[in-house]
Image: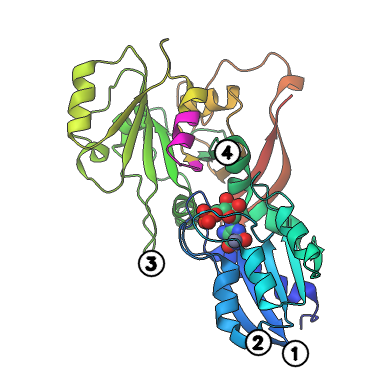
Amino acid sequence: MDIMNDEYYMSLALDMAERAQGQTGINPVVGCVVVQDGALAGVGTHLARGTPHAEVHALNMAGNKAKGSTVYVTLEPCSHYGKTPPCSDRLIAEGVKRVVVACEDPNPRVAGTGIEKLRAAGIQVDTGVLRDRALRLNERFIKYITTGLPYVTLKTASTLDGKIATRTGDSKWISNEASREIVHTLRHRHQGIMVGVSTVIADNPQLTTRLTVDGLHPARIVVDSRLRIPMDCRLVTDKAAPTIILTTELADREKQNALEAAGLTVIRCGDGPRVNLKAGMARLGEMEIGSVLLEGGGTLNGAMLEERLVDRMMLFLAPKIVGGHNAPASFSFDGYERMSDAVELEQLEVERIGDNVCITGVPVWK
Ligand code: AOF
Ligand code: ZN
């Protein structure tokens, strides 16, 4: 039995927010619970950008029970006119007595001013209840709103010896079915999914979200310095999701025209032989892609790592060894001279998925 305290209600608000991940675009996921006279009076969650915020749904449900209530909200109530009016004004107008907040809103347009406004109106505000869980939940939003760059989750599925295919290129399947289903949930929760053109040429992937229930398809992003993407591959022909190619000034203009005629977006970033990944990420940010799931291959994973563009890694490992001097590995780059130069992961989480293991962590840049 849970103890009824602030965490009891805040965890309900967080649960709702968690399930809305993937559908709010560059907006955060937010949950809100209204409690009056020791009972739930309203619940709400932000469902999509441009639609009401969590507090509005919960207060609407509470009706005249909002007056004198305690309101739990996973993110500081906003104080600005965005696509919707400020939630802090609404909370004041409803006459709520106390507001409990999990974490501050890092949006520079809010950043503490929502809480200040509530306090100035005489409302008791308590912050920091389940703060770490709330911050983790909105890590993608936090990165994007403070830097303009998408949050990048790098995912690999490899054998224990780090291979993502055998020496003949066979890769079906490395990880087990349950691991692959988790990857589809990850796709649903990101706005973009990124691969290198070699993966497109080798596997002709669909890069869509396929779950036992409907999911959202992220934009498909291919890093392709010379526009080698085949015109008859699924990404070009299936129209299943928007598709963006990051390329360089060296790429053929006619191939660009053909790809654009097929409905794809071609972005030139970089005048050298390789795509300028930093510039590419900035361009994706401008297009309001706030999160990217990076699904490799090894060369792109290595390049993104060297550019320090990776925010979180999820490494799925299958208990297999395939060897092969030239079999592709999940990270392929020149590498470091010394072990002390290695990229290390912190905030480590280890999860067993049947006979697979998923290691999740945040890289530390030295
Ligand atoms: C809240 N409650 O449920 C959400 C908030 O353009 P808008 O109007 O949707 O505003 C988006 C900004 O509002 C977003 O960047 C974040 O700072 C805040 N989101 N705030 O009080 C909510 N979704
Ligand atoms: Zn709001």
Mark 4 or mark 3, which is nearer the start of the sequence? 4
In the rendered view, would you say 149 is above or below 65? above
Which quadrant, please, contains the N terminus?
Answer: bottom right
Q: Where is residue 285 in the image (x, y as percent from the top left)?
A: 49, 36
Mark 4 or mark 1, which is nearer the start of the sequence? 1
Disc number placed over residue 213 in the picture, else none: 3
Crowd tier of the residue under label 4, counting other residues whose Cα lies within 10 Å: few below 14, some 14–19, many 20 or above = some
Label 3 – label 2 distance at C-alpha: 36 Å
Look at mark 1 in the image and give the residue it sits on. Answer: 37
Label 4 – label 2 distance at C-alpha: 57 Å
Mark 3 or mark 1, which is nearer the start of the sequence? 1
Label 1 – label 4 distance at C-alpha: 56 Å
Left or right: where 318 falls relative to 204:
right
Look at mark 4 in the image and give the residue it sits on. Answer: 160
**Residue type indicated by callout 3:** Val
**Region in magenta:** 281-292
Q: Is residue 288 magenta?
A: yes
